[in-house]
């Protein structure tokens, strides 16, 4: 058991309440704020650290964030992929930056709604707020040193207790990206249907992701983005049935517990707000192939694919492609 804690502090209610819990549980506590914007330290961060009576450490991560998150996201969009900047930021910037200044006597504490089972990350008790998905790309070396004190709590109870204790925190929930997501070198092109016929024009493929409905114009019925082709600069649209995938391929795998043999049965989650479903893992052409137990809707290349055994995260990767067994328009 570590005697000290370095608490990742953002100014939100979760990290602020986690800090207050650590003050009670550890003999020495520091708060760490990772500055990714250069816009100064939020008043909530200063006030929370001051009220808790702990040292506030500022980590300058602007350059890292620019390279590893902003430019990386722009590159992903230009390739017709749908990036997950928050998962990327956890792995390459925020948790990594704090881990680099972690003292041997400290544990790295965050306000994520997740739990630990030994060195494995597990789903948080609050199913609506579980954030284990966003931690699936963080290295085992970092997660080994992490503690998540809110993992067994409900969000509504955290907010109520923080308010009761008069802990300073930002009242508005931070739900949006902290930067403008734009594609690298984006340019106009065609919107086509599944037969290849032109159905409209677009201002750039970076504005579209698989499963999207908005911005497609009127076509007499509900249409969705079913594919984005960066080589041809096209956005393909179809009906809802055309969004179904029977499987996908994942690359850049980050394993915590790699299956001892393949094929292997696991649970797979392809988006944050999506329920994990049974799937079979197998190796094909130096990448991981995932066959869903039942077809999944709007599986987007570029998104994080988190793998679970029961409630434990065993790994994560980036979806590189999807498979459709019978990709035909539901008009037919």
Image: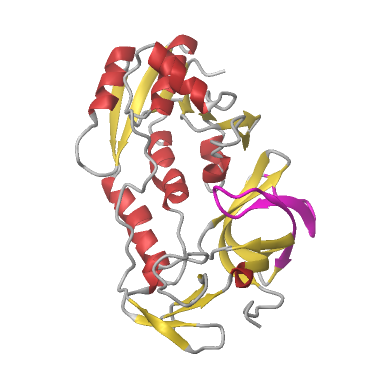
Q: Is residue 70 visible?
A: yes
**Picture coordinates of residue 115 (x, y %)?**
60, 30
The stretch in magenta equals 257-283
Q: Residue at x 66, y 67 (%)?
A: 245
Q: What is the x, y in percent for residue 327?
A: 65, 78
Q: Is residue 165 magenta?
A: no
Residue 83 appears left or right of 137:
left
State the residue in front, 149 or 239: 239
Closer to the camera in the image, 298 or 321: 298
129 versus 103 height, above or below: below
Q: Is residue 257 left or right of residue 210?
A: right
In the image, taking residue 178 as reference, residue 24 lies left or right, namely right
Q: Residue 263: within the magenta?
A: yes
* Picture coordinates of residue 46, whole percent (x, y): 25, 23
Q: Residue at x 43, y 47 (%)?
A: 86
Q: Is residue 165 above or below residue 231?
A: above
Q: Residue at point 47% right, 13% down?
A: 26
Quadrant including the N terminus = top right
Between 63 and 163, the one nearer to me in the picture? 163
């Amino acid at each position: 058991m570590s005697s000290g804690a370095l608490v990742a502090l953002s100014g939100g209610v979760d990290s602020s309440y986690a800090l207050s819990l650590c003050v009670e549980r550890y003999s020495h506590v520091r708060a760490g704020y990772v500055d990714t914007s250069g816009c100064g330290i939020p008043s909530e961060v200063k006030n929370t650290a001051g009220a808790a009576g702990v040292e506030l450490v500022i980590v300058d991560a602007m350059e890292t964030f620019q390279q590893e998150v902003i430019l990386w996201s722009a590159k992903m969009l230009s390739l017709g992929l749908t990036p997950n900047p928050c998962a990327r930021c956890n792995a390459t910037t925020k948790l990594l930056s704090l881990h680099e200044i972690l003292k041997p006597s400290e544990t790295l504490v965050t306000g994520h709604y997740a739990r630990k089972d030994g060195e494995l990350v597990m789903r948080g008790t609050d199913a609506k707020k579980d954030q284990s998905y966003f931690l699936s790309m963080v290295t085992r070396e970092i997660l080994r040193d992490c503690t998540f004190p809110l993992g067994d709590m409900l969000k509504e109870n955290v907010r109520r207790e923080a308010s009761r204790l008069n802990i300073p925190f930002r009242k508005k929930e931070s739900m949006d990206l902290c930067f403008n997501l734009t594609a690298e070198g984006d340019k106009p092109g065609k919107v086509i249907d599944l037969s290849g016929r032109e159905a409209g024009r677009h201002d750039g493929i970076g504005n579209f992701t698989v499963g999207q409905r908005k911005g497609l114009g009127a076509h007499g019925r509900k249409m969705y983005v079913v594919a984005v082709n960066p080589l041809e600069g096209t956005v393909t649209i179809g009906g809802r049935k055309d969004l179904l995938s029977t499987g996908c391929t994942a690359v850049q795998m980050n394993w915590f517990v790699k299956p001892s043999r393949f094929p292997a049965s696991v649970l797979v989650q392809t988006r944050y707000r999506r329920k994990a479903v049974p799937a079979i893992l197998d190796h094909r052409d130096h990448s991981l192939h995932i066959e869903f137990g039942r077809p999944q809707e709007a599986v987007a290349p570029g998104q994080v694919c988190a793998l679970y055994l029961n409630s434990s995260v065993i790994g994560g990767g980036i979806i590189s492609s999807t498979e459709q067994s019978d990709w035909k328009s539901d008009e037919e």
